[in-house]
Image (cartoon, grey):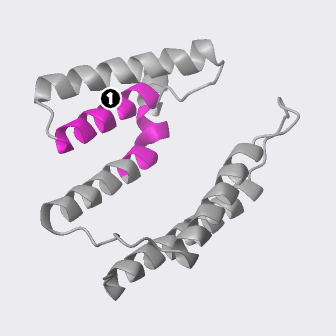
Amino acid sequence: MTVPGRRAADRLLGLCLLGLAAFVAVQALQLEVPFSYDPVGPKAFPLGLAILLAGLSLVLVAKPGDNGHWPHGALGLKLLAVLGVLLVYATLFTRLGYIVTSLLAITLLARLFAAAWGKALLTGALMAVGSYFLFTRGLGISLPHGLWLSALA
């Protein structure tokens, strides 16, 4: 027997994700670069993700699952903390730079999921530096160094 509140939770999440997809699509369509280094352009990837998210959100609204439920207690707070860490990460990304911001975010996320401080810091450092070199050297993607580092130069 399914509880009506469980289906409502899935539908509400689907509607919120649909709104997020619309926001991402609008932002992607407004993205302009002074030069084109790619024949597809920088709009294609976020626009594709927005379309995919919108499609999956509509599935969640039209056919919610039977086992969806609202998180309670500590899990709900942990999810809000993850959202907070990601919002701070997005806010500080260009100011502090990729490595510093990623180190802080990964360390805090590891701590949220019960990693010891030493392991969380080591994981944060390895993932931040490793992914930085993967993106910059392996894929040729330019990542921000941070305003604080450019002030020292």
Name the secondary structure under disc 1.
helix
For this orientation, the residue located farthest to the front is 1
Residue 18 in the image: state x and y as whole percent.
58, 70
Q: Identify which residue is drawn at 59% across, 12% down.
A: 137
Residue 112 % position (x, y): 19, 44
| Left or right side of 42 for 75 | left
Residue at horizontal 33 percent and vertical 17 percent from the top: 126
The one of 46 and 56 positioned closer to us in this rendering: 56
Query: Is residue 30 something that shows in the picture?
Result: no
Q: Where residue 105 sits in the image (x, y, percent)?
A: 32, 38
Query: Nearest the camera: 92 or 112?
Result: 112
Residue 114: tell me if it is visible: yes
Picture quadrant where residue 67 is located: bottom left
Say which residue appears at 21% left-offset and 56% top-offset. 78
* Residue 107 location (% of width, % of height): 25, 33
Residue sitting nearer the eye, 144 or 41: 41
Q: How would you classify the magenta stretch by its main secondary structure?
A: helix
Q: Is residue 89 magenta?
A: yes
Q: Residue furthest right?
A: 39
Q: Which residue is mark 1?
A: 103
Q: Which residues are magenta?
A: 88-113
Point out the image quarter for the N terminus. bottom left
Task: Indicate whether 143 appears above or below 71.
Answer: above
